[in-house]
Image (cartoon, rainbow, N blue to C red):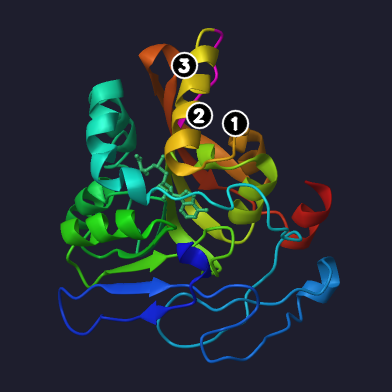
């Protein structure tokens, strides 16, 4: 699996170069040392930091809840990376694209941006063109997807990370985080593990929604991804309640296809203390 590879490649030298990293996992950073969290003792069992999947060496990261290896252990979108765009158009026409772009012009002036699971880079390409001041960390576990994204987005403002978001060492705070059709890959525990480990002043999300009629369609989609990519998750998680509990407030919302698809723009109003979160959520 890509995210367990522990390789690091940095090609970010000069303009238009793009950095690609593969994060190492399980408590070892690229320089070979192990790091123990100090903050961890206060709220969770001791836990080892992982290597930051970015240039600049090692840094301890805040732990979240205890991470057990399970679920989606073999998820790999490489096999569908080249076809993903066409499969999407065949199934939904331009509806997913419209969801991703729904609030694209309402994001203010974000400087530090996290893009989770962008896949083949179509959103990223547009975003980078529209926000020339933004520096982006783009995290995706699929090397194939990242390769496609890299071919679309040649900018030294984007750092690509081939990494598992459940293990990636995020910056503590972003101006904007983006997750388009990404949350549906995770169960609630995994999602909490991801969302909990950073704060973002704004959170731009597109996702499927359960409606009274969409159950068979969603089941079909999950079956497809299960066969094609090894996805273990079988149903949508309730990211809305989770975000509300972390102190995000839903600012803008739009749905499409009879409620099946939704775009959401969340703003951070009052982040809860992380330790409280890990204990009570
Ligand atoms: C359903 S695709 C969505 C792609 C794109 N964001 C879109 O709007 O169509 C999910 C993406 O998340 C990535 N992904 C799945 N699990 C991941 C994980 N644990 N860490 C990082 N990326 C992951 C996949 O490789 C894939 O590119």
Q: Quadrant of residue 18?
A: bottom left
Give the residue pinned by disc 1.
Answer: 234
Q: Is residue 119 magenta?
A: no
Q: Quick one: label 1, few (<14), some, or many (20+) residues within 10 Å?
A: some
Residue 170 falls left or right of residue 156? right
Q: Secondary structure at mark 2?
A: helix
Q: Residue at x 26, y 60 (%)?
A: 147
Q: Which residues are magenta?
A: 207-212
Query: Quick one: label 2 or label 3, which is nearer the N terminus?
Result: 3
Vertical order, 76 against 51 (above or below):
above
Residue 19 falls left or right of residue 22? left
Q: Secondary structure at mark 1?
A: loop
Instruction: Residue 256: give x, y in percent of width and height.
Output: 37, 18
Instruction: Residue 278: give x, y in percent of width and height.
Output: 77, 56
Residue 177 vs residue 85, the one in the foreground: 85
Q: Secondary structure at mark 3?
A: helix
Residue 130 vs residue 153, the one in the foreground: 153
* Cα–Cα gap, marks 2 and 3: 9 Å
Give the residue pinned by disc 2.
Answer: 222
Query: Quick one: label 1 or label 3, which is nearer the N terminus?
Result: 3
Instruction: Residue 27: give x, y in percent of width and height.
Output: 65, 78
Q: Residue at x 48, y 72 (%)?
A: 5
Q: Quadrant of residue 19?
A: bottom left
Vertical order, 102 against 200 (above or below):
above
Point out which mark residue 217 bears: 3
């Amino acid at each position: 699996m890509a995210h367990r590879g522990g390789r690091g490649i940095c090609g970010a030298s000069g303009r238009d170069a793009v950095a690609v990293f593969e994060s190492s996992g399980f408590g070892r950073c690229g320089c070979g040392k192990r790091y123990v969290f100090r903050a961890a003792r206060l709220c969770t069992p001791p836990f080892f930091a992982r290597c930051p999947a970015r240039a600049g060496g090692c840094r301890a990261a805040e732990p979240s809840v205890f991470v057990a290896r399970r679920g989606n252990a073999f998820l790999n979108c490489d096999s569908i990376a080249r076809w993903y765009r066409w499969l999407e158009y065949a199934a939904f026409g331009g509806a997913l694209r419209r969801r991703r772009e729904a609030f694209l012009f309402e994001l203010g002036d974000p400087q530090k941006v996290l893009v989770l699971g962008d896949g083949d880079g179509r959103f990223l390409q547009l975003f980078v063109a529209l926000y020339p001041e933004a520096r982006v960390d783009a995290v995706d576990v699929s090397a194939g997807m990242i390769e496609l994204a890299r071919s679309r987005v040649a900018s030294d403002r984007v750092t690509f990370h081939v990494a598992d978001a459940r293990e990636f060492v995020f910056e503590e705070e972003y101006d904007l985080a983006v997750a388009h059709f990404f949350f549906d890959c995770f169960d609630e525990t995994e999602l909490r593990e991801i969302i909990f480990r950073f704060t973002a002043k704004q959170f731009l999300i597109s996702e499927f929604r359960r409606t009274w009629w969409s159950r068979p369609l969603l089941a079909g989609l999950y079956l497809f991804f299960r066969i094609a990519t090894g996805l273990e998750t079988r149903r949508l998680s309730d990211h809305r309640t989770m975000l509300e509990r972390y102190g995000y407030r839903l600012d803008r919302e739009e749905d499409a296809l009879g409620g099946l698809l939704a775009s959401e723009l969340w703003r951070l109003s009052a982040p809860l203390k992380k330790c409280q979160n890990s204990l009570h959520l």
